[in-house]
Image (cartoon, rainbow, N blue to C red):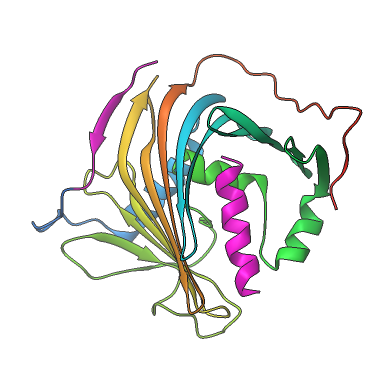
Amino acid sequence: MLNKSILALVVLVLTVSCAKQWSDTDSMTAKLPKLKQKEFLAKLDSIAEIAPKYMYTKLKVSFKDEERKISFKTTLKAVNDSAITAIVSFARIPVFSALVDRSNLTVVNKKDKCYTIQKLEDLTSELGVSFQRSAVEELIYGHALGFSADKKYYMKNDPFSYTLSSHRKSYARKKNEIVYTYQLHENKKHLSSIKISVPMDSTDIEINYLSWQESQNYTLPKKVDISVKNPKLSVQISLEYTRLDVVTPEALFLTIPEKYEKCN
């Protein structure tokens, strides 16, 4: 279960016009204007509803754990509430392509000349955690992962931050529950961070949005740092959106060469 949760996040990350940019790295030292919990919830719900119909972006990705440090580039295309494609390249050479639609995850391994097609419901069962296309969209759009307006939340009594959690304590009373904590930026336009605690695996995932950009009135991430920690593993992932187009319609498809066989 432990390593399966990590694998789910890594898969999610991999299958992820000039713009106005700003940084969110400055620390919040002054007391913030009061924000009611219902306003916080309404803001997260509003953020979740705002996303471009089409999105094309290039990502610089850095991955680091105890054994290796690698960097690669990903070309990502998305049609909101439909499908996402990604092409991952090392040294400008495409290594594999992926497509996530409403029911399947398809991966074409160009290096080994093979492919896999797996139903998302089967992948969820194997990983032990929910794997859905919508979660990938939430990550690349900067939405609150796992948020639902129908769930109960608790606002932290902190005059220096806007923080909301799915549980009163950092770890759930029931070991099979997952704790989500959202921090809204002081400008109330977007998130600053998301923390996900998985008590069953003693796993903590933290997503920090370092900077954002605006394009066609959409607010989207620019630089994101992701850390995954548990007793056996420590992973650091950095994403940087180097190109962005939210206007041009995209037709998403993935071609599997006839000579390719199923991956073992």
- The residue nearer to you, when weighing 98 against 261, is 261
- Determine if the magenta segment contains residue 128: no
Outermost residue to the left: 30
Estimate the x, y position of residue 206 in percent, counting from the top left: 41, 61
Estimate the x, y position of residue 86 in percent, counting from the top left: 62, 34
The residue sitting at 32% across, 36% down in the picture is 212
The residue sitting at 40% across, 19% down in the picture is 216
Estimate the x, y position of residue 236 in percent, counting from the top left: 42, 57
Q: Is residue 108 above or below residue 263?
A: above
In the image, the segment drawn in magenta is 1-25
Name which quarter of the figure residue 30 lies in: bottom left
- The residue nearer to you, when weighing 176 against 10, is 10
Name which quarter of the figure residue 161 lies in: bottom left
The residue sitting at 62% across, 51% down in the picture is 11
- Res. 91 visible in picture: yes
The residue sitting at 33% across, 30% down in the picture is 213
Q: Is residue 120 above or below residue 177?
A: above
- Tell whether 58 sits left or right of 221: right
- Res. 86 visible in picture: no
